Amino acid sequence: MNKIIEQAEEKVQQYFKRVDKIKEYNQQKVLEAFRKNKIGLEHFATVSGYGHDDMGREALDKTFADVFKTEAAIVRNHFVSGTHAIACALFGNLRHGEKLVSVVGTPYDTMEEVIGTRGNYRASLMGHGVKYEEIPLVNNQDVDLEKLEKVIDKSVNMVTIQRSRGYSTRKSLNIETTKKVIDIVKSKNSDCICFVDNCYCEFVEEKEPLEIGADIVAGSLIKNPGGGIVETGGYIAGKEEFVEQAAYRLTAPGIGTEGGAMLNQTRLIFQGLFMAPSIVSEAIKGAILASQVFEDIGFISTPKPDVPRTDLIQTIEFGRPEPLLAFCKALQHNSPIESYLTPIPDEVPGYDDKLIMAGGSFIEGSTIELSADGPMRAPYAAYMQGGLNYAHVKIALDGVLKELGM
């Protein structure tokens, strides 16, 4: 193993203790939800057709709701992505003439098409008559809390709070900052719905957004809460009235959460949820190590090793395309699946710039598995995420350093 990695690993051991404490707390929380809902083998049985009277699906929704400490949840393999789950939450709870505000400036690329700032306008929220405003970040880094106080009034029906950074170098929003945002919004307009995009953030901290005042959250099952084994799907959780409105967008009015055959996936989703706190902790440890390694060799890497984490993503700014390409090549060659391939930049639906993507995952697009991607634009940053086990991340970093000639 490269000496740089060995030295970095010694430096970060003190931060791993904090990660382990959070893991144990969240594992206890998940276990208690399973026990409360008396999950048994009968809940793994599958139904077909319309999916009526599926006791496993009902128990799954209740268990997720209890884990997130909220009233209701809809957990389905029918969500094709986190973006799909988020779109259902937004379309389900916004009407023509109502107003949505993004508190983190421009959101993640695929969300721009959902909202309507680019892409197929007629299919978007704005194309359906929803008004939209963005609150720019302070120095492209922090939420502008002063501007937020001025923007939120009785005309704003919903705010969207994207916790993870997306393809930007801004700070991700931890629970403390998210609570400040929600408290300001509710103080200015108690009826305003606080929606949180929770992708990449589940189980990274001890509390989830619904515990500190959020009304509704959404995320993907092929990220944190799927534990690396769930094959597809997403979830929406929150106050019952908002979850039900979102469910009508996934299925249809009158059906909501009551339909949808789970196609023998319920047991897998339960198991993935149970595994999630441990899997997330492994990925976080890998990200901390990566942060220290790249800081030690002179690249800008955020968050810093000592900073408490709020999501999985580690950003490494290379400044030039060549080291970004080398990083992704090495990561791909140290993946368990399709290690023989070499990633190249290409067009991806929903994005303006060509993207470079790396990571041979067992499940396509699974970002709880070790992977990285980034747009081919300045500052030529790699967004590394995931890692089913810490040892794999460590091995992959060794391969990256060799590819970089270190």
Image (cartoon, grey):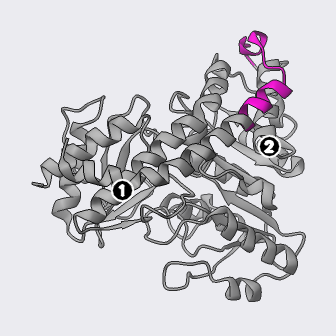
Magenta region, residue range: 29-49
Residue 144 in percent (x, y) is at 63, 83
Rendered position, 264 above or below 197: above
Foreground residue among 367 and 17: 17
Rendered position, 5 above or below 144: above
Residue 65 in percent (x, y) is at 80, 40
Quarter of the view holding residue 178: bottom right
Residue topped by disc 2: 248
Give the residue displayed 38% in from the left and 41% down from the top. 370
Q: Is residue 318 left or right of residue 368?
A: left
What amino acid does circle 2 point to?
Tyr
Q: Is residue 359 left or right of residue 158?
A: left
Q: Is residue 157 left or right of residue 126?
A: right
Does any portion of residue 300 appear in the rendered image? yes
Query: Is label 2 in a helix, a strand or a loop?
Result: helix
Give the residue displayed 67% in from the left and 25% down from the top. 270
Foreground residue among 295 and 43: 295
